[in-house]
């Protein structure tokens, strides 16, 4: 069963505004998705038709989401991140 990241972050951050929790949860989901794509396909990909190398577009997404996550320093996410790691190993 997939963890409800927003609910878990709200549980750990009762004093944070809902918009901060929602923004953090969305950025975290996108960051994880981008990281998984980069891990699977690499930073440099080859164009399927031409074979020309190009930067994986998920690198930019990962970087943008990292900036968002870093800007929301009030949100405590240590427990949620640990749970996400545990779930991804299953």
Image (cartoon, rainbow, N blue to C red):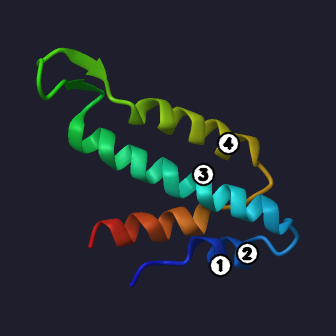
SS of the residue under disc 4: helix
Q: Which residue is mark 1?
A: 7
Horizontal side, residue 29 vs residue 68: left or right:
left
Residue 76: quadrant of the picture = bottom right
- Residue under pointer 2: 10
Asked if the residues shown at circle 1 and circle 2 are in contact, with their CB atoms under 8 angstroms apart, the answer is yes
The span from disc 1 to disc 4 (Cα, nearest Å) is 19 Å
Mark 4 vs 3: CB contact within 8 A: yes
Q: Is residue 79 above or below residue 44?
A: below
- Residue 73 placement (x, y as % from top left): 76, 48
Residue where numbered disc 4 is placed: 68
Q: In terms of sequence position, does the residue under pointer 1 or pointer 4 come before the other? A: 1
Q: Between residues 90 and 19, which one lies in front from this camera angle? A: 19
Q: Residue at x 80, y 62 (%)?
A: 19
Kindly identify which residue carries mark 3: 27
Q: Would residue 5 appear left or right of 20 to someone viewing this image?
A: left
């Amino acid at each position: 069963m997939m963890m409800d990241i927003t609910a878990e972050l709200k549980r750990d951050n009762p004093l944070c505004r809902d918009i901060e929790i929602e923004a953090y949860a969305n950025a975290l989901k996108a960051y994880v998705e981008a990281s998984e794509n980069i891990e699977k396909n690499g930073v440099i990909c080859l164009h399927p038709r031409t074979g020309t190398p190009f930067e994986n577009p998920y690198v930019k997404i990962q970087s943008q989401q990292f900036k968002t996550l870093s800007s929301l320093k009030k949100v405590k996410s240590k427990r949620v991140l640990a749970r996400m790691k545990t779930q991804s190993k299953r």
